[in-house]
Image: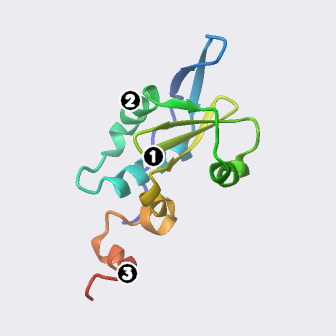
Amino acid sequence: MNETPAFSPTETTLRYRNPRGKEVLVRVSQHAKQRFWNRWNALYPNSPLDYQNVHAKLAEYFGRSVRLTQFSRKLTVRLARYGKDTLFFKTNGFTFIVQDATLITVEISDRGKRHLNKERYTSSFHDPESSQAYCPSHPR
């Protein structure tokens, strides 16, 4: 009931242009699809994303994202866990994290919404009974 639906195992790719102008294909990992789906539905509970359309929405948002090249001190510390070979792309509240031409995960990057990246907010967003436990102002 609270399980994430299984995604098809087909290889799907996204594209971006590197600084030399060459088009680079980016494979989308299963984890990245699930995280995007979970975090989309946590961020936009009034317009949930059907898991069958997750790749189309992911491609749409990744296609208009901008590669981050200059990091503030705080962002550098927050994102240091991924290593120097990692690329970051950002658009409309999402940060896409790419390593070795593979999209490994998607994070919510809006300042007031980052708490939605936590597992407790994204794993049971669709179950109103279990989500009440995480809302301190909700009467029980």
- Left or right: residue 125 versus residue 72 is left
Could you say where residue 114 lies in the image, as x and y percent from the top left?
A: 48, 58
x, y percent for residue 136: 36, 82
- Label at residue 60: 2
Q: CA distance from mark 3 to mark 1?
A: 23 Å
Identified by mark 1, the residue type is Phe
* Quadrant that contains the N terminus: bottom left
Specify the amino acid type for callout 3: Ala
Confirm or deny contact between disc 2 and disc 3 (CB under 8 A). no
The quarter of the picture where the C terminus appears is bottom left
Where disc 2 sits, the SS reads helix
> Which label was assigned to residue 36?
1
In the displayed orientation, state which residue is furthest to the right.
84
Q: Residue furthest bottom?
A: 140
Callout 1 environment at 10 Å: few (<14), some (14 to 19), or many (20+)?
Answer: many
Q: Earlier in the sequence, mark 2 or mark 3?
A: 2
For the point 42% across and 58% down, the residue is 113
Could you classify mark 3 by the number of other residues whose Cα lies within 10 Å: few (under 14), some (14-19), or many (20 or more)? few
First along the sequence among labels 1 and 2: 1
Front residue of this view, candidates 69 and 48: 69
Q: As rendered, which of 33 and 82 lies closer to the eye? A: 82
Would you say 69 lies left or right of 80 here? left
- In the image shown, does 94 or 2 lie closer to the viewer? 94
Under mark 2, the amino acid is Glu
State the SS at label 3. Answer: helix
57 sits left or right of 78 in the view = left
Q: Which residue is mark 3?
A: 133
Q: Earlier in the sequence, mark 3 or mark 1?
A: 1
